[in-house]
Image: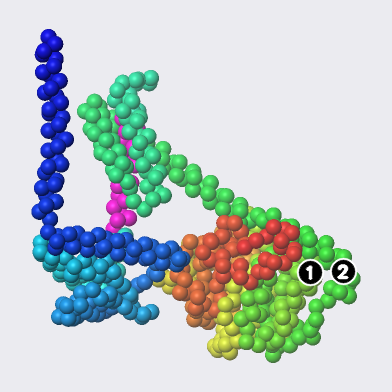
Amino acid sequence: MKLFRRCQRILILSLLSVSVFAPIIFVSQRLKNLSTTGRKEFIEDLSNIKYRTDGLKLSVEQEASEGLKEPRKVLYEDKDLVSAVSYTLKENHDAKKSGNVGDTTDMLEITENGTKYENQDGDNQFQRREISSMSGEKKQLNQEIVQQDQNAHSQSRKVIDGKIKQLKDVKPNRAVPHDQNVQNMRKVTERINEMKDQVVRAKLYLSFTPPGSKSNLVKELKLRIKEVERAISGATKDSDLSRSALQRMRNMESSLSKASRAYPDCSSMTTKLRSMTQNTEEQVRSQKKQVSYLFHLAASTTPKGLHCLSMQLTAEYFALDPKERQFPNQQKLHDPELYHYAVFSDNVLASTVVVNSTVSTAMEPEKIVFHVVTDSLNFPAVSMWFLLNPPGKATIQVQSIESFDWLSTKYHAALRQNSGDPRYASELNHLRFYLPEIFPALNKIVLFDHDVVVQKDLTRLWSINMKGKVNAAVETCHKSETSFHRMDAFINFSDPFVAKRFHADACTWAFGMNLFDLQEWRRQNLTTVYHKYLQLGNKRPLWVAGSLPLGWVTFYKKTVALDRRWHILGLGYESGVVRADIDRAAVIHYDGIMKPWLDIGIGRHKGYWSKYVNYEDSHLQRCNIHA
């Protein structure tokens, strides 16, 4: 046993000796074969590595010393790209001919009119220095690398040429991206509608299941409904549906196919769908009525801020001395040679915008005289506002309807119309038919509604040939326009009295901005004609409530048409009026219930009105009135 262990130890020690001394013998034999040239090449390789490390260190230090800069945003054009590629090819060709591969070149450089590409081959320059120092197999290997690099450049040129061709093909048709976006949005809308239909069908199948059922199909349908509804809610906010939404759509379709096999009775399905459709339609009608009622309620209610403003101004007005309540330049009020404008309003801000916009756009504001008529409740507030904020060089007069004694004694009973809407039954609304009596010294006057904004000088309006007519207004009888109205939509032509005197196809026109010849009005005694029709309308239903149908019959065949650019309507409701028409109009009109001073006003149209309101005024700020 001892002999066996001794032999085993000797064997192990001998193997260890062989493993130790054999590598030493092989390495020493290899070192003898190294030549002087090999040693020099090895030393040169070490020096090159050291040189490269120093260069990299230097470049890093330089970059660190410079601040980080954002990339410049550049716009690439086809012509610049073409010139860039041709320039690059020429530079590469010259570099090949001269053999000066190590030079750093700018492949493309264009200033502000074009684009700039910079390609500095610093690393390639170093690599090519290494190539010159290598010999034998290393040189051949690097030549192959250079050849591959040139092939890559040629392939990149082909790719660039292909891109240029694509850009040239797409450039003439600039509407393609927009059309593609529209098509994508349509696809998304179609998918959303399909998913909504799937939810309806799933709920319909669930209605066929007995109450309290906990079958696997019921659980699956409820789960699919929740998943699809979540996907639909996300799609309404995003521009596209996600992949998970489409997968949920497919899962729902699979569940619906199972349900269709479980409930194959089509007649009961049809009956249930009809019942659901009828209930939905009733809900929609009810919601529309509620929305309409709330909109009209908001339109007829004075906002809290305007009520606060009126109260503040009224208190300050009564605190003034009676002599301080007088407006300057009152001698101009009856001068027929000046430009007289009138607005009848119980709204302080609305009348302010009408006055400010007219005066600020006028070429000769010193020739403008504004007559503001309001009710007795708002007379102190309106007066105080214009005392604090006079309209520049223009002259202003504020009157109360209660100061017209002749109106209250002679015409007060006739002004009471059977209308539940105070906007139509208001005396201020019908005061327009008494202009010759209100301004007996004037020959012409322009009447504004209080929901208009003047955008251009109106001097040329006063030189329009009235052709013996009384009223100059913009027509609303053209079907292609958003403000289109027919007489038979407001007037009852089934009544023999109306059918005998008026034509249903007669051209209609608009209130809002009207030029009246008061001399011709007095000569034809049109105020008496108005009273005749007003009393007839109170006895039987000849026309809808309001001043517009009464104006059509009072000034029937006595109205001259103005160019539609004088007066654009439709900013107080969703009429579809385009911005180009709004911008070139002399007067824009917020007809409808969505007035710009209300919260329900159309946001994209409010800016035309709000720019004539000084929201920095202390009264507006105290009442929390903001743009």
Q: Nearer the viewer, residue 426 or 375?
A: 375
As drawn, is 168 to the left or to the right of 30?
right
* Pointer 2 residue: 320
Q: Nearer the viewer, residue 207 or 195?
A: 195
Q: Is residue 18 magenta?
A: no
Quadrant for the N terminus in the image = top left
The three-letter amino acid code for the residue at tag 1 is Met
Image mark for residue 105: none
* Pointer 1 residue: 384
* Majority secondary structure in the magenta region: helix
Which residue is depicted at the point 32% across and 46% down? Answer: 242
Q: Is residue 189 magenta?
A: yes
Which residue is depicted at the point 63% across and 72% down? Answer: 612
* Residue 602, x across and y down, in percent: 53, 61
Q: Nearer the viewer, residue 602 or 513?
A: 602
Which residue is depicted at the point 67% across and 56% down? Answer: 303
